[in-house]
Image: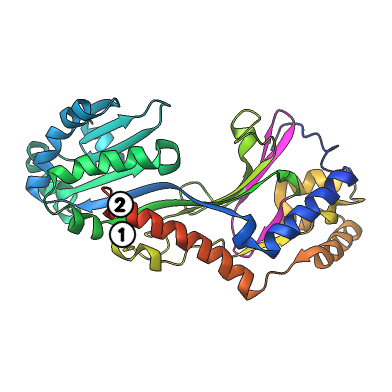
Amino acid sequence: MNNYCDTRRILNKAQIKKSSALINKVLGNPAKYFKFTIDGLSMTIPLESEDVRSLKCLPALIESETEFTVIAKTHSHKEVKTTRFFNQIQIINNEGHSFSLFYSSMMNSEMNKKKWEHKKTYNEGKIDVNVNTFGVDNTKIILSLVKKLWPAYDDLIARSRITVLDYTADIPKMFTPHLITTYAYRSLYRGFVKDGLFTGHQYGLKAQCPIKVYDKSAEQEGQYLRYTDYTRFEKTYRPAIRGNKKILISALETADFNFRGLRYYDPKLLIGMPDHVLHLLLEHGLDSGKCMLSTKDSINLKRRMDKHLIKLNKAQRFEIRDGLKSQLTNLKDLLLHPDS
């Protein structure tokens, strides 16, 4: 974190007390005050040959029945090394957000069958979509059109597996620098600064399964859903990295998604904190930063952390899990029953 960070608001006592009251209220009753969403989805579909062939009709079908912009792309052999698919149908809504369906055509599949056979790439498809930004109703429209082309749509979607899932929990009105956490698992910490303001932190690498705590309003140029302070917890889950290679859509609501490992601290921990200590903690996180301090500062910080740790009981943790599970159930219903 090389940019200058203005700490005046972070250390403002009135702001700290306001944030303290809010975070204790939210964590005390997660089911009531957290706003849970599924933010992004990537799923792999076990297609049959006729299903792949039928997708060639999809762009024309979408253009005839909707006002979406449709772009059909063919990827080069070099691009396939990362996409794993030769063909992409990108559907763009009025706000510029997209729904993408990837597949490999039969001609390309036969040419590369030997190369990709062990991965069965040639008879798989993939859907990438952020239902929140593309829109639930828009997603239903596209999936309903796909369903017209696939006689066994219900079975194909049920047997599809999650490859990437982003899930979130939001706290409107929360001043992000006052959302203080540590992480129980050994992970790289990264702090974010934008225009002199600390806008969040992340545990883990982007290509793995990171947990990110950030100011959504700062990401949206100062305001999100009419809030100028809006904190989002975001977890990216990749089953293959976690050793679970099969989370099927048919059993999606049984998966245990949560923010396990995060510990939360009352912002009052910051009252009276020396500026040089705060800068170090913003850049390196509480755990690593504590080890870089002088003995005296490290002991004082440890006392603050012990005093201001917010301990969640089992019921509160289950509320977070169940809030996410409810969103997973909604997502499953959307994918399996787009006509309802």
Give the magenta range: 179-201
Disc 2 to disc 1, how far (Cα)? 8 Å
Viewer-nearest residue: 186 or 163: 163
Amino acid tagged 1: Ile
Amino acid tagged 2: Leu
Q: Which mark is residue 335?
A: 2
The structure residue drawn at horizontal position 43% and vertical position 27%, both measured from the top left corner, is 95
Relative side of 9 to 69, left or right = right
- Based on the picture, tell me whether residue 304 belongs to the magenta stretch: no
Where is residue 74? Give x, y as percent.
20, 29
Where is residue 193? Give x, y as percent.
69, 35
Mark 2 or mark 1, which has the lower sequence index? 1
Relative side of 279 to 156, left or right = right
Main SS of the magenta part reads strand
Q: Do the CB atoms of the residues marked 2 and 1 lie less than 8 Å apart? A: yes
Tell me the residue that label 1 is attached to: 249
Viewer-nearest residue: 47 or 336: 336
